[in-house]
Amino acid sequence: MSDAPTDRNRLDEEESPYLRQHADNPVNWQPWDEQALEAARERDVPIFLSVGYSACHWCHVMEEESFEDEAVAEQLNENFVPIKVDREERPDLDSVYQTVCQLVSGRGGWPLSAWLTPEGKPFYVGTYFPKEPKRGAPGFTNLLDNIANSWGEDREEMENRAEQWTQAAKGQLEETPDQPGERPDESALTDAASTAVRAADRDHGGFGSDGPKFPHPSRIHLLLRAYDRTGEDAYREVARETLDAMADRGMYDHVGGGFHRYATDREWIVPHFEKMLYDNAELPRAYLAGYQATGEERYARVAEDTFEFVERELTHPDGVGGRDRGGFYSTLDAQSEGEEGKFYVWTPAEVRDAVDDELADLAIDRFGVTDSGNFEGGRTVLTLSESVETLADEHDLDEGEVRDRLERAREQLYDAREERVRPRRDEKVLAGWNGLLISALAEGGFVLDDRWSSLADDALAFVRGKLWDAESQRLSRRFKDGDVKIDGYLEDYAFLARGAFDLFQTSGDVDHLAFALKLARAIEREFWDADEGTIYYTPASGESLVTRPQELRDQSTPSSLGVAVDVLLSLDQFVGHDRFGEIAETVVETHGQRATSSPMEYTSLLLCADRLDTGSLELTAAGERFPEEWRERLAETYLPDRLIAPRPATDDELEEWLERLDLDEAPPIWAEREHVDDRPTLYACRSFTCSPPVHDIADALEWAEDLAPDA
């Protein structure tokens, strides 16, 4: 074995499934580490950086075309230090170089291909490159030759370009406004919702007039909150049209539950088939909000079916502390047997083979399965093509019988599909993505069934047990087969803190609140920059990159900065200082102008600004238990700014909680709010005004309605 790290492919030493997929390539791939970076400096050659993830279709294509080719490998190995990065493990690197790609080309995506100086500064960027020139795209082999030659002949020009692009990335990612403005005012919510309505596709749902169509859960929350505030029907209808489109058509898996990544077309028919944990966390939260805001029972079923998919297919089987299940895996691939979507699509003959004769025609009509198909090779992506009412008329059945038969057909399709070769699963457990699902499951446990709170509790115990270092008070990002790696990013701390706090709200377990507070203190210590008035994405004690990014925009996951601000606002109620609230307010003021000028990009941050403006609806519940009638009423009531604060019945019992939270005295949300008449008691408060103690949830909600913010 050679002593030089770049003389061999080192990815067999990595645990990332994506990196290990490339361990047998003839390319001498390196992980992003000091050995690889030092090799580039010593050899004085550029870095070729390839960023992707295990479920990425075009990543697989580029591997097959180029990275498995001996001649291409020889070019890469001789003239570059080739580095492979899993963007799910290293979102900081992805953020930096994706930003450059967007600035230079106007587009980004995966695989991301970037050529860097030995110092990590980019001078050429793109995404997928075919091996040979195709449809106007340069060929990868030609690019490698041209860049290698230019590095020798035009070195100064390339380094100047690298410096310019790096400074542009700093301006986009790191810098904050010289003069922070005022935070958005009370009109910002409705202004943003009106912008969303104007951008909506009123014919097919979602936003934009062309494909692809991506889910934007934060926009659903924005529209529903604006509808609740104003009663403006357009806000609710756009939210419903989008929820219906995603659930009715091909982005949703009608056989096994759960959502694919996005739809490739305007009508939401053909998805990109990968299933990501974060989509199957954030979308159920949106559907639960939709259920509460509209009363549409179907939205609750979609959320529950998605949770069942995650429980069945993405849950680690080993728990901690005697639990029989753990955290959640990251993704299911889009491909099986080398073909995208093969696991999920059907022909009429396959449906007839899978289900009983008396069910086949009904299933074919319901799911729109045709001889010509709506996908490649005459196959069909299942959609809800016919309503139950129409099917009842056409098949001369009552609607209840149609539903029963369709459920039997779905079960038989599921059993038949289980015989197919399954897509690969990326079994990384990521702290932040688990935090997103823990939040969703906590709400699902409150709205739907306690079993989801139990699943969330097991996952939080797993992530805390595997990835949290109690001594250093630091969080790691990734667990895989016993291996823990990578310092946590803001999204890991913020998403997990929100998950722990949401689970405290719905379970009353003070240990979850204590953990959320530890994570919040770490956010303040590692990510908050008082001089710049912002919260950065990478920790102050972490690796220094060419720029230190912030994550302000909602992308495939919500803005980590927005979630951090939101959770700091929540936890500010439970500490004896006001730093959390001051940080949140400062960040909103720093970035307020951005949020109001482009609300579709900065929705999470804008929702935080609205919460700052109106205050939360605080529901302090004093008692040994949360009465079932309270839970049932809150489960069906849309309260977007609800903050539940369980506490023990008496101040004597509260003392034990305060010790566990390291608090000298009760925070205002608990202070002097004991139970009354030895019965569970509710206190409803907003903006320092509180109801009298009540035992009837209806009385508390009536009071809250009287003090609800005006439009």
Image (tube, grey):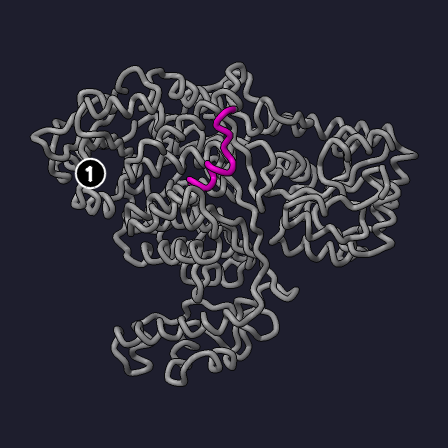
In which quadrant of the rendered view does residue 648 lie?
A: top left
Q: Position of residue 336 (x, y in %)?
A: 61, 64
Q: Is residue 122 magenta?
A: no
Secondary structure under the numbered disc 1 in the rendered image:
loop
Q: Is residue 465 magenta?
A: yes
Q: Position of residue 60 (x, y in %)?
A: 68, 56
Which residue is farthest bottom?
Answer: 357
Check the picture and name the quadrant holding the C terminus: top left
Q: Amino acid at mark 1?
A: Arg
Q: Name the residue tied to disc 1.
A: 625
In which quadrant of the rendered view does residue 670 lie?
A: top left
User: In front here: 576 or 263?
Assistant: 576
Q: Position of residue 633 (x, y in %)?
A: 19, 45
The relative height of residue 70 versus residue 463 in the rendered view (above or below) is below
User: In front here: 184 or 642?
Assistant: 642
The relative height of residue 163 versus residue 399 in the rendered view (above or below) is above
Q: Residue at x 83, y 45 (%)?
A: 76
Q: Do we see residue 196 in this rendering? A: no
Q: Which residues are magenta?
A: 460-471
Which residue is farthest front?
Answer: 322
| Crowd around label 1: few <14 · some 14–19 · many ≥20 (10 Å) | some
Which residue is farthest right?
Answer: 153
Q: Do we see residue 472 in this rendering? A: yes
Q: Residue at x 39, y 50 (%)?
A: 284
Q: Residue at x 37, y 84 (%)?
A: 358
Q: Position of residue 253 (x, y in %)?
A: 46, 62
